[in-house]
Image: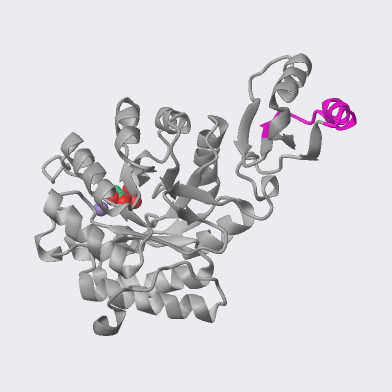
Amino acid sequence: MLLVCRAVDEDAVRERIHARVPTPHGTTMCRIGDQLLVHVPGDQLALADEMHESGLLLRAVTDHSGAPLTDREAVPPGSIVELGGSATVGGVDFALIAGPCAVESYEQLSASAAMARAGGAVALRGGAYKPRSSPYSFQGLGDQGLRIMAEVRAETGLPVVTEVVDAATVELVAEHADVLQIGTRNAQNFSLLKAVGQAGRPVLLKRGFGCTVGEWLQAAEYVLAAGNPDVVLCERGIRSFEPATRFTLDLSAVAVVKHLSHLPVIVDPSHGTGHRHLVKPLALAAAAVGADGLLVDIHPEPATALCDGDQALDRDRWFDLATALRDVLASLGRDLTLREPESAGQAR
Ligand code: PEP
Ligand code: MN
């Protein structure tokens, strides 16, 4: 059962729960804005009545989903996640996050950041630690990549999103980056999910390419159960029998998750398709299906990219996408917080 309380009453609520719920196992708490969400195992009707009478309970919700903290009913209007600076995901905002797959050098990231910003992105992406299928592929610059990201962040003011691949480096990555990305291959690494739940940074949680929507939401539940409400979900394609695209971008999952959960959902049409000519159509479709934003691979010189160059957009394609997106979102009556692409006119 989920008990929705006021965050200001946290101490009194904790006291009451500890007195009433004999085994704390399965009891989780997460503060979202001015509300404190408390999940207690089973239906604790007596406890709910008692808390209601003492004015500690705003409402109680029966847990049907097994992921009560991420359930839509916990925050019916939907939650808004702050990425850093003034960038947010969720609500009326449509957030564009763009950058290279991997940080390759200061020059490459700095040029990518300028491109990202000019196209209207609110945050910069880039991998320093790259989980590659082959040990012979570029593995990322590691700590050096983090330092480059922090430098570009300081120069541009763009919050940076980067992947953290193991619990041992969570603290280091959290020192340098604004948002911790959990990649598809780590989507069910539960010790890592618990660690990012305690890192004090927003988390961008990719869907595991072999995960059902339910398993994806359970993964998010781990992060919230560790006390971190700031989770952005990212659909990035699932494994299917179809080889024409790198993965099968499951846009129906966006609509499903928007229905089931209060967490914002963005889409990665780059990793989802693997081909730059497919990024624009799938990005526009993602906006149309109700996504809260996009994570897009861009590169100043895709032909030289050390990682995933085939799916990276060059400047012209990126500006073309940003312009087309504005039209699609406007036609849906969505409020745009997307910045005007600076040279959209030239790009057209
Ligand atoms: C990425 O975004 O750089 C990445 C590796 O994505 P995924 O985990 O979805 O493959
Ligand atoms: Mn990649």
Q: Is residue 311 magenta?
A: no
In which quadrant will I find the N terminus?
A: top right
Spot occupied by residue 131 in the image (x, y as percentages of width and height): 25, 42
Picture quadrant where residue 258 is located: bottom right
Up the image or down, 229 lies above or below 207; here it is above
- Using the image as rendered, state which of residue 238 and residue 101 is in the foreground: 101
Left of 136 or right of it: where is 42?
A: right
**Residue 254: x percent and y percent?**
52, 60
* Residue 175 spot, x, y in % from top left: 32, 33
Q: Residue at x 86, y 32 (%)?
A: 52
Q: Residue at x 49, y 44 (%)?
A: 231
| Residue at x 65% of width, y 50% of height | 72
Judge whether residue 348 can be spotted in this image: no
For residue 33, side relative to residue 304 (left or right): right
In the image, residue 290 above or below residue 210: below
Above or below residue 272? Residue 328 is below
Asked if residue 316 lies left or right of residue 162, the reply is left
Please report the bounds of the magenta region as a residue range. Answer: 37-55
Q: Position of residue 310 (x, y in %)?
A: 19, 64
Q: Closest to the observer: 233 or 319? A: 319
Instruction: Tell me if residue 120 comes above or below residue 345 in the rendering.
Output: above
Report how many numbered discs are placed on residues in the image: 0
Image point 20% across, 69% down: which residue? 314
Quadrant in which the C terminus appears: bottom left
Q: Nearer the viewer, residue 94 or 280?
A: 94
